Amino acid sequence: MGKIVYLLDDRNKTLYDEDSVPKHMKTREPDAATLLRLLENRLNLLGVTNIDWLYCAITIEPIRNPVFYPNKEGITVLYEKSKLNEWLNKKGGIGLDPTALSQKAKLTDYLVPTSEQLLDFVVKSSSIAREFFVDQYHDFKPEETQSVKEPLLPNSDLEKRSSHVERITPKRSRAALLFRSIFCCISPNSEQTKEKEPHAHPRPNYFPQ
């Protein structure tokens, strides 16, 4: 595996394997403190609530400058460097490790973890696969939405269509005028016809006056 990085223009600082990111994109490898915070955020998103092991083993508080005591198992606990220094100073600078990892520990014996070491520690402690913390970059390009346009007709077809319209338009206009004139002529006549109809005679009164 290559380095763990995030994109410079990514506010969320999503973690990627460096090998999966295109070469032209600007990336940065997070320092230990930043990586711890990003991994903690991801654990919260995954619903992991018991993350005391991610904090300083002395104070159970968030870590700004993480260090660990190296052993064959890798990272077993993390310390805040300043708190560890205070602890060891009480022992005269050399003393028992806070979690009994060494009987005669010195501050110089502790190391700053690399990104990969921190990630391995989080994966092991949370029992969550690496893929949930580090993504593979994919350069998704939004699909270009093509507007549906009527295909352009050749000039010859356009000329034919326009000439066809010119031939039809006068005929339709004359037909419309003729129809309208006929309709208008019929309407008044029909009214006149109604007016000329004789009025109905009143019924005769068969009863004598």
Image (spheres, rainbow, N blue to C red):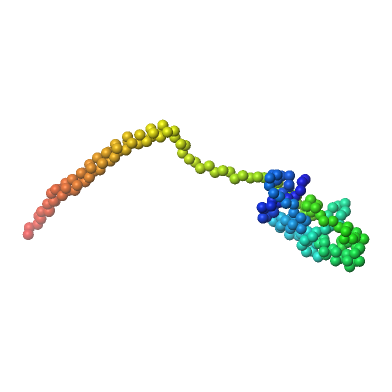
Tell me where residue 172 appears, x and y as whole percent. Answer: 30, 38
Q: Is residue 4 visible?
A: yes
**Residue 84 or residue 9, whichever sits in front:** 9
Q: Nearer the viewer, residue 180 or 24?
A: 24
The quarter of the picture where the N terminus appears is: top right
Number of numbered labels in the structure image: 0
Judge from the rendering whether residue 163 lies leftward or rightward of residue 49; answer left or right: left
Where is residue 171? Give x, y as percent. Answer: 29, 36
Tell me the residue at 66%/52% (across/down): 9
Query: For the view shown, which residue lies furthest in the bottom direction?
Result: 90
**Residue depicted at 53% across the width and 42% down the height:** 146
Residue 84 coordinates in the image, percent (x, y): 84, 63
**Nearest the eye: 205 or 114:** 114
Residue 48 in view of the camera: no
Q: Please determine whether, in this image, residue 166 is positioned above or below residue 35.
A: above
Q: Is residue 41 left or right of residue 143?
A: right
Q: In this view, does 92 lie above or below 17?
A: below
Residue 75 in the image, given as x and y percentages of width and height: 83, 54
Residue visible at 35% across and 36% down?
165
Residue extending farthest left: 209
- Seen at 20% across and 44% down, the residue is 185
Work out which residue is located at the far right of the displayed protein and give it.
104
State the quadrant of the C terminus.
bottom left
Which of the 4 image quarters holds residue 113?
bottom right
